Image: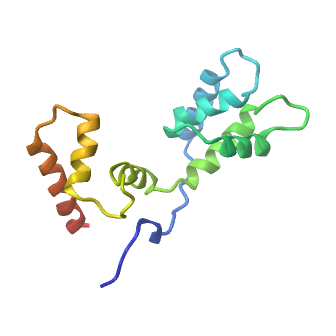
Amino acid sequence: MEMCSLTHFARKQREITDIDKMKFETVYELCDTEKKGYLNREDLKMAVVMLFGYKPSKSETNMLMDQAQAKDSPGVCIEMFACLMGRKLSSDDHYQKTRQIFNTFDVNCRGFLKLEDFRAAFSRVAPRLPERTVLEAFRGVFVWNALD
């Protein structure tokens, strides 16, 4: 029996659209609250949260700042920001969110989920959810995987 993992799939490069570029500009303007003309570290973190839904680690923030910051600039200009976010978006792993959700459920790091994992996860985020709904969600994962 062949095993399959999410990392098995090749990444597709996503093309950056005009809508993506407009979103980058809008987020940049929203994060440059003091209208300095650049984003500092904290501004950049907030921009990544707004665009990708997660707070970047210290090392990721350092890497982005190092790549984008000109020697004579105190922060990231809009052109470099758009370039960095475009690269980040085009190489975004399509299975990242699925992996994050799976890891949230897999608190015992087994690499597979049991009904008890679903119960524990749902009890934390929706404690009043009926047991029947949790069971249906658990069964639904297997039906979805069978159709895949």
Q: What is the total number of numbered labels drawn onto the structure image?
A: 0
- Residue occupying the point 62% across, 46% down: 86
Horizontal relation, residue 87 to residue 104: left or right? right
Q: Position of residue 95 (x, y in %)?
A: 43, 57
Residue at the far front in the pictured view: 108
Horizontal relation, residue 10 to residue 44: left or right? left
- Residue occupying the point 12% across, 43% down: 133
Return the residue nearer the eye: 106 or 39. 106
Horizontal relation, residue 111 to residue 145: left or right? right
Return the residue nearer the eye: 89 or 21. 89
Residue at the far bottom in the pictured view: 1
Q: Position of residue 30 (x, y in %)?
A: 60, 22
Q: Position of residue 3 (x, y in %)?
A: 35, 78
Horizontal relation, residue 38 to residue 9: left or right? right
- Residue occupying the point 72% across, 28% down: 39
**Residue 99's image quarter?**
bottom left
**Residue 18's image quarter?**
top right
